[in-house]
Image (cartoon, rainbow, N blue to C red):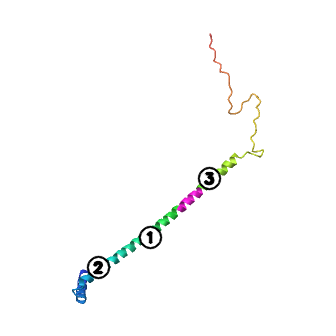
Amino acid sequence: MFDISFAELIVIGIVALIVIGPERLPTVARTAGYFLGRARRYVNQVKHELHEEMELDELRKLRNSMQETVDTFENSVRTEINKIQETVNTDTQPATTPEALPTEEKPVKNTGTTKIGATTSSPAPETPRQPGN
C-alpha cells in the first residue's frame, strides 16, 4: 500500500522507540494498528460501493437498451398488424362499382365445338373386323 521495505520499517520502529519511549510504545502501536485497520476497511468499503455503482449503471444502460429494442419490436409488430388489418378490411368490403361486381355466366350454346380444356365424351373406337367373323 505504501511501498515500504522491511529495512525502512526497522528504522521507523527505532525512531518511534526513542521518541515515544518503551512504556508508551505498545499503546501507540495498538492505536496506530486500529486506525490503520479502520482506514483499510473504509477504503475497501468505498471501492466496493464504487464497483456496485458501476455495475448498477451498466445494468441501467442494459435495461434501457433492452427497453428500446422491445419498443422497436413492438412498433414493428403493430405496424405489420395494422397493414394486415387494412388488407383484410379492403378485401372484405362489398364491391360497390359495377366493374368490381362479378359477372354472371351465360349459358353456352352447343355449336359443335368444344372449349379448350373441356372434356367431351367420344364414342368408343371401333375395332376392325377380321374376315370370317
Residue with the mark numbered 1? 53
Pointer 3 or 2: first along the chain? 2
Q: Residue 56 in the image: state x and y as whole percent.
A: 45, 67
Q: Is residue 27 above or below residue 122?
A: below
Q: Quadrant of residue 25?
A: bottom left
Q: Quadrant of residue 1?
A: bottom left
Which residue is nearer to you in this view: 130 or 100? 100
Which residue is nearer to you in this view: 71 or 23? 23
- Dot 3 alpha-carbon crowd within 10 angstroms: few under 14, some 14 to 19, many 20 or more: few
Which residue is nearer to you in this view: 126 or 129? 126
Q: Can residue 1 be seen?
A: no
Residue with the mark numbered 2? 33
Q: Is residue 82 above or below residue 133?
A: below
How far is mark 3 from mark 1, CA to CA?
A: 41 Å
The span shown in magenta is 67-76
Q: Is residue 114 above or below residue 58?
A: above
How far is mark 1 from mark 2, CA to CA?
A: 30 Å
Amino acid found under the numbered disc labelled 2:
Gly
